[in-house]
Image (cartoon, grey):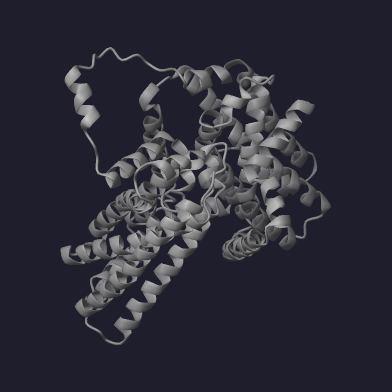
Amino acid sequence: MNRLWSLIKISLNVNFGISARRYELKNDKGRRTEIIATIIALIVGVGSLVFGYAYLLNILFDKGRTINQPEIILGMAFLGAQMIIMFMGIFYILSSFYFANDLNILIPLPLTQWEVLISKFIVIMVNEYLILIPFMLPPLLIYGIKMGMGFIYWLKSIILILMTPVMPLAISSLLVIILMRFINLRRHKDALTVIGSILVILIAISINYFGQTIPPGSEQEFLDRFITTQYGIINSMGKSFPPSLWAVYSITQTGIDSLLYLFLFTGLSIALLALLIWTANIVFYKGVLAGTEVSHANKKTSKEDIYSRKYRAKNPVWAIFGREWRIFLRTPIYSTNGLLPMIIAPFILAMPFFTQTKDLDELYNLIDSPLAGPYMVLIILGFNLFISGTNMAACTSISREGNTFWISKIIPISPREQVIGKIIHSMSISGIGIGINTILFSIILGINIWRIAIIVMFSLLGALFINILNLMIDINRPKLHWTNPQEAVKSNLNGLFGIISTIVIIGIISIILLFLLKLGTKEGLVYFILTLIMIIALIPSLLSLFKMAGDGYNKIEI
């Protein structure tokens, strides 16, 4: 047990860079200022999001209380948290269990398979707490304070927060280690994992959305059935994952029933964790080592092939572009964080339009008015830019190289050419989201072809500016010291800074466009002025990126 505890402490230290941050705070004044500023920015950014989330929950609680169902906010919180952890946990587990750089060090050590796996499991769980606590605290606080709950409620709430990620992560871990043991997809297993994950999540979202749609003409009957049952709404939500109901019942009911539900929830979590430990001790290393097997190619290489490969050279920029895509696709945590928002977000945004309601009829009537065109352009442009800014491709471009960044420093390709290749790679990912989103909304809203062209042009110009800024952020503060690829994206604050910069840019563009429209400027002239502003902003930002790359590549040390 002491051995396991030591491994957990070391893993947490490495994951969060605790020793490095402690040293920097004590000895590096410049770095200390940066860390403090980052913490303040993080508190302000996350705090504003949590405040808005709590405000909406408070309204939902009041609405639920009028129909004797205030527990709805707890049901949504527990179900949402566990579903998110279960789905996203698959990618983090794949990254930490099978693609981490520390496996070559840990496997030869006198450690059992389950000790290595559990240490990684706990590190993932601690990372999940950083998202889970801001997500779970507001509904628990709102319900507890407004319902006047006592000490036992708060004690059980702490237990439930600690136990919430255990069950979904254990289920995801069991699925991953069993599949990786028996399914060897060799060269293409990572790409197929990413494609399969995207398809599964898209199908799950579609089924969940359309399955819960109220049948036309039965709205009143549907609501009456819910209102007459105290736990009707959360019972309906909990059908997809019953343990979320047990958690709600354990803190909202009283007496022996409350304790039984609490023991059921915690007991199943512990049982699944025990099953994971038992399974890991049998098959974990076999799955890890199977991933290192290399298949022998039967194809013979001719003399002509050897000479053609020897003397064939690529343009440096496109060589970097190809390398970026290979790294991106070979590591599921990179591709899912970069590609999933591009593919899933447009469909989530478009789903409400597939249900015909009176509100949508009013929206379509508004769209048909002559003055609505520029506003439709602005709305879709805002969606496109937000999707582009959340793909994490540009703001982790340097960080993803990790301890192999020394290769980028010595290869005969200038920093300028390297960042151009990285920008093209980031733009290709942004282009996927822009294309899907624009096509979907153009079909749904019936936007004419010339406005579509305007949307695409502005989206690409805006995405280019966002990706340049995000790459600047990563050049200035790359996260190169990580043991598994998950840390390069999930534990990297550059992603948060990238989202903040994206929101600021969207706000500036919106203000300019709305100001011009309010002045009565003709639509064509508005687009012309906005195009000039974007191009003028792009030129100095691109030159600054080139200069920053030249200086930054020399300063970065591994």
Horizontal relation, residue 167 to residue 489: left or right: right
Q: Is residue 96 above or below residue 511?
A: above
Q: Quadrant of the N terminus?
A: top right
Is residue 156 visible to us here? yes
Q: Residue at x 58, y 52 (%)?
A: 228
Is residue 240 visible to us here? no
Q: How many marks?
A: 0
* Direction right: furthest residue: 151
Position of residue 3 measured from the top left corner of the image (x, y, whole percent):
76, 26
Q: Quadrant of the C terminus?
A: top right
Q: Is residue 156 above or below residue 56?
A: above
Q: Is residue 16 above or below residue 43?
A: above
Horizontal relation, residue 348 to residue 557: left or right: left
Position of residue 501 measured from the top left corner of the image (x, y, whole percent):
46, 64
Horizontal relation, residue 367 to residue 137: left or right: left
- Name the residue nearer the viewer: 153 or 181: 181
- Name the residue nearer the viewer: 106 or 52: 106
Q: Residue at x 61, y 46 (%)?
A: 78
- Name the residue nearer the viewer: 5 or 549: 549
Position of residue 255 measured from the top left corner of the image (x, y, whole percent):
80, 43
* Direction top: furthest residue: 298
Q: Residue at x 45, y 51 (%)?
A: 553
Position of residue 166 measured from the top left corner of the image (x, y, whole percent):
65, 36
Residue 164 placement: quadrant:
top right
Residue 506 placement: quadrant:
bottom left
